Image: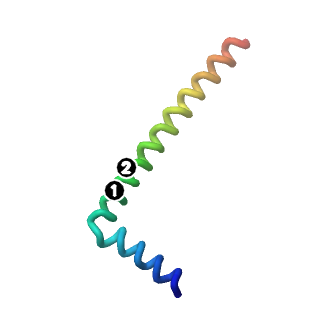
Amino acid sequence: KGVMKAIGEIKDFFQSDPLGRKLVEVMKEVGSVCQMVRKKARMALKEYVRKLIKEDE
């Protein structure tokens, strides 16, 4: 019972409280920035590996 109550309170905080909603927005932005960073890192690594393969030939 106590765990379910705590989960409900946390859920209510993120849905109703202005600060909770702002935290949700910020975390969504952080998530999208992380996705972009991962994508750019993968692209750079891919290009680096291609150069290495080309040099080896």
Density class for disc 1 (Cα within 10 Å; few <14, some 14-19, many ≥20) is: few
Instruction: Identify the amino acid type marked 1.
Output: Glu
**In which quadrant of the rendered image does the C terminus lie?**
top right
Residue 40 vertical placement versus 5 (above, below): above
Q: Nearer the viewer, residue 7 or 31?
A: 7
Residue 22 vertical placement versus 48 (above, below): below
Q: How many numbered callouts?
A: 2
Q: Residue furthest left?
A: 18
Q: Nearer the viewer, residue 11 or 51?
A: 11
- Residue name at image x 53 percent, y 30 percent: 43
Instruction: Identify the amino acid type marked 2.
Output: Glu
Residue 47, percent from left and from top: 57, 24
Determine which quarter of the picture holds residue 28: bottom left
Q: Residue furthest right?
A: 57
- Residue name at image x 35 percent, y 58 percent: 23
Q: Secondary structure at mark 2?
A: helix
Density class for disc 2 (Cα within 10 Å; few <14, some 14-19, many ≥20) is: few
Q: Secondary structure at mark 1?
A: helix
Residue 5, percent from left and from top: 46, 83
Residue 52 vertical placement versus 38 (above, below): above
Do the numbered discs 1 and 2 sit on residues whose CB atoms are within 8 Å? yes
Disc 1 from disc 2: Cα separation: 6 Å
The residue beneath circle 2 is 29
Residue 42 placement, left or right of 29: right
The residue beneath circle 1 is 25
Residue 33 placement, left or right of 45: left
